[in-house]
Amino acid sequence: MKRMLFAFILTSSAPLYAAATTILDGYRITAKQESAAFKDFSAARGETFYRAKMGDVACASCHGTSPKDHGKHATTGKDILPMAPSVNPERFTDAAKVEKWFRRNCNDVLKRACTASEKGDFITFLTSVR
Amino acid sequence: MKAVLSLLCALLLLPAISLAEAEEGNEKGESGGKHASLALQPAQMNVKWQQECSSCHIAYAPGLLSPESWRRVMAGLDKHFGTDASLAPAESKEITDFLVRNGSNRWSGTAAPLRITETSGFLREHRGDEVPAGAFKRASVKSAANCQACHSGAAKGDFNEHGVKIPN
C-alpha cells in the first residue's frame, strides 16, 4: 500500500514539476541578465512577496492567506481557484497565461512590471506549499 | 412609408431574434412590443471571449452593448475600470471582432457608454419602481455589475424578468 501511494505521488507530481520547472528556467535566464548578483530563486523571499502589503493590497488579499485556499476577486467577488499546484495542478502549466497574469497583477498591485527574480521567487514559494 | 420601413427593418432583424424571446416579447407587449427583444447572446459562441472575459466577472453578453461601445471597451483593456485586463494582440482582435459582430443593433443615439449600467436599456429596466432602493448595494449583490446576483441566467445571456430574484 505504502509503495502504491509512493508510486502515485511520484507519477502525479512529476508533470506538475516539469511544467513549473520549464517556466522557472526561463525566468532564471532573465533574472541573471537583470542582475549579476542573482544566485537562485527563494521560496522564503517568494512568501514575503506574496504576503507583503503594497499600498493597501497584497497578493494574498485576493488569492487568500493560504495559497491552498480559494481566493476572491476584490472588486467583483468572483471565486479564484487556489494558487498552490499541490491542490490545483493547472497552475504554472501555461507560460503565456502565467505571463499574462503577472503583467496584469503586477501593474495593478505594484504599479510596475515585476522582475524575473520576483516572478521566480513567487512560483518557487507556491510550488513549495504542500 | 414609415410602416413599410419598419416592416423592412423587422424582416432584416428576424434572423437575430431568438424564438423564445420573440414569443416572450409578443406576450408582454410592453417595452418589447414594438421591437421584439433580440437575442443578447449569439448562437455561435466564441471560446476566447468566454474564457478571457469570465476570468474576473461573467462574460457579459455581446448584445448588452453597441458595437462602438465594445470597440471602446476593448481598446482600453489595460485600464479596465481600474484594473489591468490587457490581452495579447491576437486574442484582443478575435474577441473584439466577436463582440462588434454581435453587439446590440437596437442602438440609437451617438453616446457609446463603457458601462452596461449606463445604457438606456439598463436604466429603463432598473428604475425605482422595478428595483428597491439600496438593492444594488446589498452585500449579497455587491454592485449593479454583478448581474447574476438577481438574474440567475445572466452568464448565458438570459435576463428574462420572470426569472429575477432579488436577494435580501
Image (cartoon, helix red, strand yellow):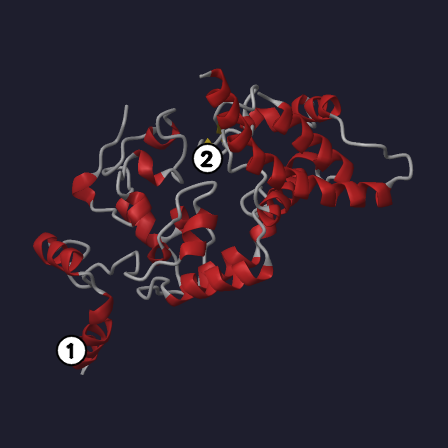
For this rendering, which residue is in front, A97 or A129? A129
Give the amino acid type for the residue marked by disc 1 in the picture. Ala
> Which label number is shown at residue B3?
1
For this rendering, which residue is in front, B12 or A70? A70
Q: Are marks 2 and 1 on the same chain?
A: no
Q: Residue furthest top?
A: A2
Give the amino acid type for the residue marked by disc 2 in the picture. Thr
Question: Residue A54, how many percent across, how many down?
Answer: 70, 27
Protein chain holding label 2: A
Q: Is residue B151 above or below residue B67?
A: above
For the residues labelled 2 and 1, the Cα–Cα distance comes to: 45 Å
Disc nearest the viewer among 2 and 1:
2
Query: Which residue is found at the position 40% from the left and 48% from the top?
Result: B59
- The answer to which image quadrant residue B90 occupies is bottom right
> Which label number is shown at residue A76?
2
- Does residue A57 appear in this view? no
Query: Which residue is found at the position 77% from the left and 40% from the top?
Result: A28
Q: Is residue A67 above or below residue B64?
A: above
Q: Secondary structure at mark 2?
A: loop
Which image quadrant: the C terminus of chain A?
A: top right
